[in-house]
Image: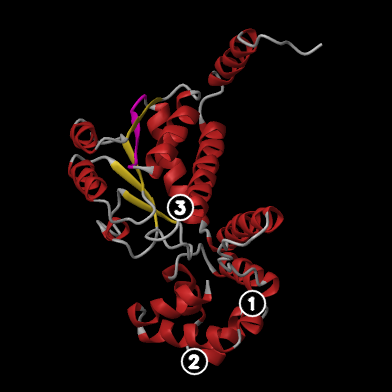
Amino acid sequence: MLDRIRASIPALPPAEQRVAKLLLLDPRSFATLPVAELADRSHVSKPTVVRFCRSVGYDGLADFKRKLAGTVNEGVPFVHRAVDEDDKVGDIVVKVIDNAVSALLKYRNDATSHAFERAIEALAEAGRAGRRIEFYGVGNSGIVAQDAQHKFFRLGVRSAAVSDGHVQLMAATMLGPGDCAVLISNSGRTRDLLDAAEVARRRGATTIVITCSGSPLALMGQGGANQVLLAVDHPEDYDRYSPMVSRLLHLTVIDILTTAVALRLPGELRPMLQEIKKNLRAKRYAQPE
């Protein structure tokens, strides 16, 4: 969280830069001081302190302080403990699990609720209106797209998962206002997804991008009313390592979206879900006693 704020300082207005520098000098105190004292120490107004919190991606001062407290108190670092050739099985188990747990806890502290709120509202509105929700991903991200489609189709909404670049382009061309295109990418540099995102945006669809911040895919149409960035940042090198941690984080984002959208869809869909579960139970050969 602090690294991201430090990197964003050049893009902030001068007054908000002073707030950022005060924060970086003493994050623990910033998380506990009242807004009046923060403003006084930064030589800015109280609304400027709140604007700074929103500029760096949080809902307001309260949300910012909550996330900041989690960061400085828990201090959950992500240390990529690479597996060595001479590691024993027990060491491999510990390293792989530690990497996954650290990444999930770090993302919990970094995730911004206002971006999720926008994405959830767009997806829920598309579901209620019978519009299309499509998930685009290539390679490993294509597997996440299939998982997302599987979860959303059970909610009774029109959904599809597309992993072929040519089909993504054709599918994006058929989208329109009210539809949603969810683009999933670890690197955010895949040419096929960049092309599909541009077409979907031109067609008026809402694009929800799940990728690392600062990537070409994240920067396309940044700040547009119909684009939502759900940034998933991690130190895993996608050029050297199999993207295990990123896939877990992307799957977690999909679970958050699915759960929240399910709660906002009309109540008549719940009997349908119960009927699906009932029919699936009948397909099991061994029934519980």
Density class for disc 3 (Cα within 10 Å; few <14, some 14-19, many ≥20) is some
- Looking at the rendered image, the disc whose residue lies closer to the viewer, 3 or 2, is 3
Q: Amino acid at mark 2?
A: His
Q: Secondary structure at mark 1?
A: loop
Label 2 or label 1, whichever lies nearer to me, is 1
Local crowd at mark 1 within 10 Å, few (<14), some, or many (≥20)? Answer: many
SS at badge 3:
loop
In the image, residue 87 lies at what x, y percent?
A: 64, 60
Q: In this picture, which residue range is highlighted in magenta?
A: 130-138
Amino acid type of the residue tagged 1 in the rendering: Ala
Q: The C terminus is located in which quarter?
A: top right
Q: Quadrant of residue 273?
A: top right
Could you say where residue 140 lies in the image, as x and y percent from the top left?
40, 43
The picture quadrant where one finds residue 181 is top left
Q: CA distance from mark 2 to mark 1?
A: 18 Å
Which badge, 3 or 2, is on the more N-terminal residue? 2
Residue closer to the observer: 212 or 227: 212
Q: Earlier in the sequence, mark 2 or mark 1?
A: 1
Is 119 left or right of 216, judged from the image as shown? right
Relative to 6, residue 282 above or below: above
* Numbered label attached to residue 243: 3
The amino acid type, in three-letter code, at marker 3 is Pro
User: Which dot marks residue 43?
Assistant: 2
Does the magenta-highlighted stretch encompass residue 94? Answer: no
Choose the circle earlier in sequence order: 3 or 1. 1
Q: Which residue is mark 1?
A: 31
Q: CA distance from mark 3 to mark 2?
A: 45 Å
